[in-house]
Image (spheres, rainbow, N blue to C red):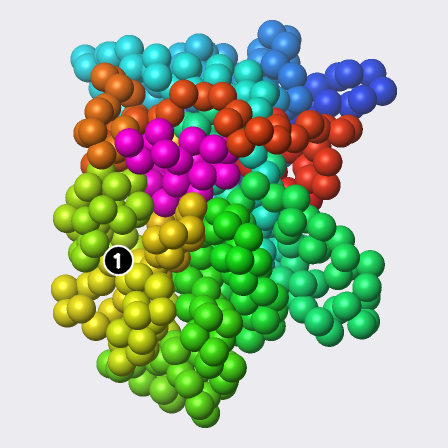
Amino acid sequence: GPGNFCLVHVSLVPVLNVVGEQKTKPTQHSVRGLRGLGLTPNILACRSTKELEENVKEKLSQFCHVPAANIVTLYDVSNIWRIPLLLRDQKAHEAILKVLNLESFPREPKLDEWVARATMFDTLQDIVRIAMVGKYTGLSDSYLSVLKALLHASVYCHRKLVVDWVASTDLEDSTKIEAPDAYKAAWNLLKSADGILVPGGFGDRGVQGKILAAKYARENNVPYLGICLGMQMAVVEFARHVMNLPHANSTEFDPNAKTPCVIFMPEGSKTHMGGTMRLGSRRTFFKVADCKSAKLYGNADYVDERHRHRYEVNPDMVPEFENAGLKFVGKDESDRRMEIIEIPNHQYFIGAQFHPEFKSRPAKPSPLFVGLIAASSGQLDKVLQGCSNGHVIPGKHQFSNGPYTPAAHQNTNGHAKKLANGVANGTYYPNGNGVHA
């Protein structure tokens, strides 16, 4: 009933480019449709390219039976983080409190830090290029969580993020024969990136390309972050090219692999796919105190991160891997599940079986993503030193699992890349939705 329910209706108010007139008919029709379903909007949130004119607000108020004070306009802004500021400036929070009879508890939103972040985002100059190697590159929303986590970390490190999409299939030898131009373009993107990220995925298409990306990053000391399948393929690559095990593979792609580096989870059913994933928040314990990932998490003893997978590193092969130089620095409580890998003598080569992007937030970026961006922009040593000292900037960002101090924000890698026509080989989204090519 009244006072217990607030309906905010988001609607489009298009602008006719010829005359610049804002049209209210779409909103009127959608509100009429809502009323036909027994719903009456309390607040109208109108999307438009520019701020609503007063006469348009009055017209909407008259025909939609919504008070003018309860009509807010969400017009195009420089970055998406400015939208909450628009809502605050138009007192949308007060309108919601009034509808819900909560006016006895009015408080001013504490958005100083949010304002500073949104303002700083618009002033970023130094570029950091990350090559995203996946097989769903034609649909960037497939990696939306990863893109947002990269954005959070890059803004935290005072870097303008540019993501170059690299289709993993284009890196494979078969593409070199079938489409040499695509093959060359993909490798050029990979080699020009400051860092490489291989996200999760399912199925065998493009797997060889992900292995090649991990191999390139390992051999050329390029910062690398592998998530879920990206970690597993890094393990397979290490076995093939460092341990000289040419038949190393995951049983997901070759059930009869002679050297099964990645195997099906022991408690899972191999015939029933429904409900067989290891899902949700699970605890990872750091086994090496001075490893990079532990430092990034503020020297925590353990972290809780979210999982979504069916296959894992074969625990029986772990001693062989570690003797060859691949360290499993994070494991579960049983020591049988490998959660985090690192190559100690590499500037930044980390793989995580979990999905750190799922817990990233603008004010609390994922530590592993911060590590990737910091390493890709020459700031990693200062970041790790700050984490080891436990120093936290008062009132600023702090990881839930430990402290983090951003380093001095200058381009220390010696090769700042300039943007040509906005972004060379990539597309920069100034509205805060990341970057992609």
Furthest residue toward right: 18
**Front residue of this view, candidates 108 and 209:** 209
Please tell me which residue is depicted at 50% across the width and 50% down the height of the picture: 221
Q: Position of residue 357 (x, y in %)?
A: 39, 47
Q: Is residue 64 left or right of residue 183?
A: left
Q: Which image quadrant: the N terminus? A: top left
**Front residue of this view, candidates 129 and 375:** 375
The residue type indicated by label 1 comes to Val
Looking at the image, residue 11 lies above or below residue 353: above
Please tell me which residue is depicted at 69% across the width and 55% down the height of the picture: 187
Please tell me which residue is depicted at 68% across the width and 37% down the height of the picture: 427
Residue 150 shown in magenta: no
Q: Which image quadrant: the C terminus? A: top right
Q: Position of residue 6 (x, y in %)?
A: 35, 30
Work out whether residue 2 can be spotted: no
Q: Is residue 164 left or right of residue 85?
A: right
The residue indicated by pointer 1 is 329
**Front residue of this view, candidates 107 and 249:** 249
Tell me which secondary structure the magenta stretch mostly adopts. Answer: helix
**Label 1: how many residues lie within 10 Å, few (<14), some (14-19) or many (20+)?**
many
Q: Which residues are magenta?
A: 363-385
